[in-house]
Amino acid sequence: MPQEIQPQPGKSPRILVVDDDPGQRSLLDSFLESQGFHTTLVESGERALEILGANTFDMMISDVRMPGLSGLETLRRMRQHGITMPVLLVTAYADIREAVGAMRDGALNYLAKPIDLDELLVTVQEVTGISHTTPLRYREDKQLPAHVVARSPLMQALFQEMSLIAPSETRVFITGESGTGKEVLADVIHTWSDRAKKPLIKVNCAAIPETLLESELFGHEKGAFTGAGTQRLGRFEDAAGGTIFLDEIAEMSPPLQAKLLRVTQDGSFQRIGSNREILADVRILAASNRHLEEEVKAGRFREDLFYRLNVVEVRIPPLRERREDILPMANLFVTEFAHGRARLAETTTTALECYSWPGNVRELRNAMERAVLLSRSELILPEHLPGKLREMIKTAPPVHNGEAPLEDVEREAILQALKQHDFNRTETAKSLGISRRALIYKLQRFRQEGFEVG
């Protein structure tokens, strides 16, 4: 049996990836290969043991829950046969206690789902002997569509990460407040994927009555129910070879969640009124403005479906966290509505930058459409803005040292949370309800301003 080996200079470290979920395998394969590693993919613990009987690897990354041999049992059998290669376990939150116990069986560490790519890269680099300061390698061949604004560091980082994720087949769960642009992100992921020449089908689960949603997604046969006068293909069939975007997924009923779970597990479904299995060659993107983990705890959303959909979680930050995007976006909307014949006055731009935009991009777009309609000249003034913005201009507190008091409060809250969590960035981000990447960029700004961030 092979033993642990040290990576040889000039050779790409070899990593064995073990996961029964094709989407997860595709993500790890696409990401690790883009970072300079060589991957071998297998779908089960049994197959992993066979591969290890004749091959050597620098490390193994394995899911915990798999049919047949679990990741934990696969690890135990490897150690029994003297294979000391480092093993990194990937686990859902519900499995973490079990995964921690696996450290006694020789697991190197574990990563919680959804996988944080930065954390994954650091761990793999440390194991394979590559400097952990080596940054992520991003794809440079992916260009943003002209209508997408990403001036802020947060959005630039988000789209850089999407450039690595989009080419894979993995499922992506998009979170964020209403109006942040979840549908726009789904468009970009599909455009950058290998499925770009096939359809992108969008379904708003909240906009379709529950009694019709199953037929909308999976279709029905003629006579399947009252009013079904003809056969109807569902949206999964319409999206064949492409991508389906399920917006407001939390609105889906439990029976329909069970049917969707089957699609994520074996890629098959049945039309209403039919016993014939149909294979769905479709990549699933899902989105919600609700916290699905809370929905799972409350029993309103299936835990197994949540983890199936949430292979990669992407949080779109609200406009108040990416103020660098406000004016470029406002100018883009003004150009669209005024056909290039209007511009923003300086006092207007100040108001736009100071406002908190609770409705996010959707609210900004509506405000610019209104302003263009009310403006009788080529100059858009504060008086053309919605009433909430005009009132804010009158009552806004003075700015001190170039920084709004709101930013003082935000900085103090972040630094306090950082200390409470012993400068652990992952736990700090969770406690604040922001992404780890968003936290890192804020800490970089605080460090430049002279604050101690660990």
Image (spheres, helix red, strand yellow):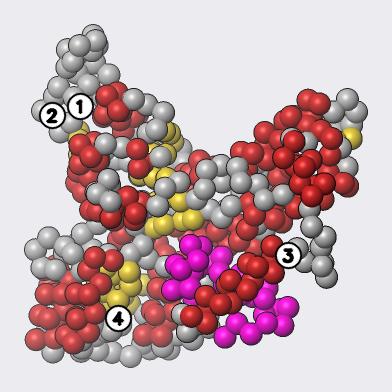
Q: Is residue 147 above or below residue 25?
A: above
Q: Nearer the viewer, residue 163 or 222?
A: 222
Q: Report, in whole angstroms, how far the alpha carbon at label 1 lies from the one at label 3.
A: 57 Å
The residue indicated by pointer 4 is: 109
Describe the element under mark 1 as helix, strand or loop: loop
The three-letter code of the residue at mark 4 reads Asn
Magenta residue span: 425-454
Q: Report, in whole angstroms, how far the alpha carbon at label 3 lies from the one at label 2.
A: 62 Å
Give the mark nearest the N terminus, 1 or 3: 1
Q: Are marks 2 and 1 in contact (CB under 8 Å)?
A: yes
Describe the element under mark 2 as helix, strand or loop: loop
Q: From where the camera sits, is residue 241 visible?
A: no
* Mark 2 surroundings: few (<14), some (14-19) or many (≥20) residues within 10 A: few
What's the residue at 28%, 70% (across, down)? 90
Q: Nearer the viewer, residue 311 or 17?
A: 311
Give the mark nearest the N terminus, 4 or 2: 4
x, y (%) of residue 287?
Answer: 42, 45
Give the mark nearest the N terminus, 3 or 2: 2
Q: Report, in whole angstroms, how far the alpha carbon at label 4 lies from the one at label 1.
A: 43 Å
Predominant SS along the magenta part: helix
* Mark 3 surroundings: few (<14), some (14-19) or many (≥20) residues within 10 A: some
* Mark 1 surroundings: few (<14), some (14-19) or many (≥20) residues within 10 A: many
The three-letter code of the residue at mark 2 reads Arg
The residue indicated by pointer 3 is: 405
Q: Report, in whole angstroms, how far the alpha carbon at label 4 lies from the one at label 3.
A: 42 Å
Q: Report, in whole angstroms, how far the alpha carbon at label 2 lies from the one at label 1.
A: 8 Å
x, y (%) of residue 281?
Answer: 29, 40
Give the mark nearest the N terminus, 4 or 3: 4
The residue indicated by pointer 1 is: 271
The residue indicated by pointer 2 is: 276
